Structure formats: C-alpha cells, structure tokens
Amino acid sequence: MSPTGFQSPKPVLAIEGLTVSFDGFKAVDDLNLYLDRNEVRVVIGPNGAGKTTLLDLICGKTRATAGSIEFNGRELTRMKEFDIVRAGVGRKFQNPSIYENLSVFENLEMSYPAGRKVFGALFFKRSADVIARVEEVAAEIGLADQLHDEAGLLSHGQKQWLEIGMLLMQEPELLMLDEPVAGMSVSERAQTAELLKRISQGRSVLVIEHDMEFVKSIAHRVTVLHQGRLLAEGSMEAVQKNPKVVEVYLGH
C-alpha cells in the first residue's frame, strides 16, 4: 500500500493491448505488461511464444497491429527505431555485435552518444568526460583490466559484457537483453547475474532467457508467454508452481 497522499510511481514501461499479426497469425496477442524502475523482469516461454517479437515491438523493429507501448510517458509505437534508442531504450541481440579489431576502450568510446553522430564523429575528441565514462563502464562490466586488449581476444562471456557496456555508454533507462548467458561458462553466468543486479539500479532491465537457474538468480518478477498471450506472472517460485505453466512446459 502506498501512504496516503503519495501516488505509487508510474511504471517506466506500460504495454497495453499489444497485438501484432503476421498474415493473420497473432505473434503477440492483446498483451499487457508493466515494468518498474530498478526491476529485472525475465520473460520466459516455449519457442514461438512471442518473446523476441515483444522486444522487436518495443524497440520499433516490428510495428504493432494494435495496442500501446508507453515508455516514460512517450508512445513508442509511432516512433522510429533511432528515436526509440535516443529516448533511452537499449537492446542487445543474441549475437554480440562488437568491433573485434578494436580495443575494449575503442568499442566503448564509439558508443558514447556524441561519438555516434556523423558530425560528432568528425570532431570527436577524447575529452576527460569520455575517458571517465569509458573507465566507469569498463569497471561496471568487469573489463577494467582489459581496456587496451583487442576485443576479438576476449572470451565469449567477456564479449557479451562488452556489448552490454556499449549499451550502458548510452545511459539507457530500459535495457533489453535476449538470452544473455547462452554459451557462457558457469562462472561467466554467475558474473553476468551479478552484473545485471548492478546495472538494474536506477533503470529497468527486460531479459529473455531459457536457462531457468539463471532466471532464478536474477528475476524480480517473471512473465510467462504462451502463443503470444500472457500465461502467468509473478515471482519465479509462484510461476513454477502455476499449473498452467507446468502444463505448457511439460507438454513440450
């Protein structure tokens, strides 16, 4: 209960009635989802449940057929992908897209907002601000000692962290990660869980993941999708005991 006279904070992301049809097939069907600041939300569900499509809709890669996606009070369904990034939404895809032949420092530096505009890039100088921000993010993602290493020499897990760092350089308020621990070692998974807990401070993190042990270690709340619809939502413990969820997962 919120104290009298105080409104509970509005969700950072409010998705209502979201639907997308591909040739009559509803990949996402009348979905409602609310994400708060400082929250790590994990979306799970069998293949074809609409998980990646949901991220595509939020970042503007796919256009909604109906419904709304409100982020910090701004309607995203009518905005271009580029403008959605600028509004504070960052997305990491399954395969890391880093510049393998550049150093960790250069990868992070290139992601600094002023360095990305064409005009900005021509006159982009390594100011003290940029260096400080790069060093801060490198420490946050656990790559402070690798700043001058070539990115191509990093381990698989470190490359994933670097890509998360490249998003953090843009200071997003909503960070979306698609299967961030796929292919990682056990110790890398544990470090990634710690990383996500750190970076959710002051922002919202939306994760798609298949690895249930990892989900348990990071999720504040879990949303289960099935055939594009919301099947269940709550703590991992509650969701795992939900008969509808058990049926969907054991039925596959």
Image (cartoon, rainbow, N blue to C red):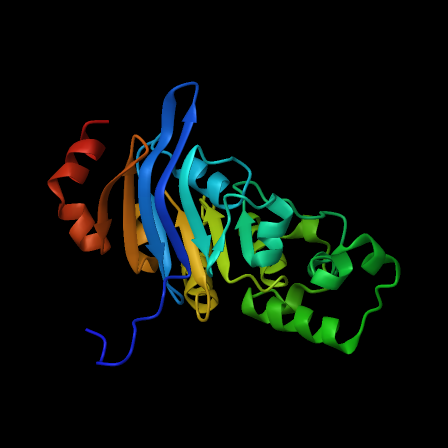
Q: Position of residue 177 (x, y in %)?
A: 48, 49
Residue at left offset 72%, top offset 48%? 99
Nearer to us in this view, 36 or 175: 36
**13, above or below 140, in the image:** above
Q: Classify residue 87 by image quadrant.
A: bottom right
Q: Classify residue 225 by image quadrant.
A: top left
**109, above or below 84, in the image:** below
Direction from residue 107 to residue 95 in the image, left or right = left
In the picture, which quadrant includes the N terminus?
bottom left
Query: Does residue 55 show up?
Result: yes
Q: Position of residue 192 (x, y in %)?
A: 45, 58
Q: Position of residue 159 (x, y in %)?
A: 60, 51
Direction from residue 242 to residue 144 in the image, left or right = right
Nearer to us in this view, 136 or 34: 34
Q: Position of residue 106 (x, y in %)?
A: 75, 59
Q: In the current view of this chain or complex, which residue is farthest to the top? A: 23
Residue at left offset 43%, top offset 58%? 205
Q: In the current view of this chain or complex, which residue is farthest to the right? A: 122
In the picture, which quadrant includes the C terminus?
top left
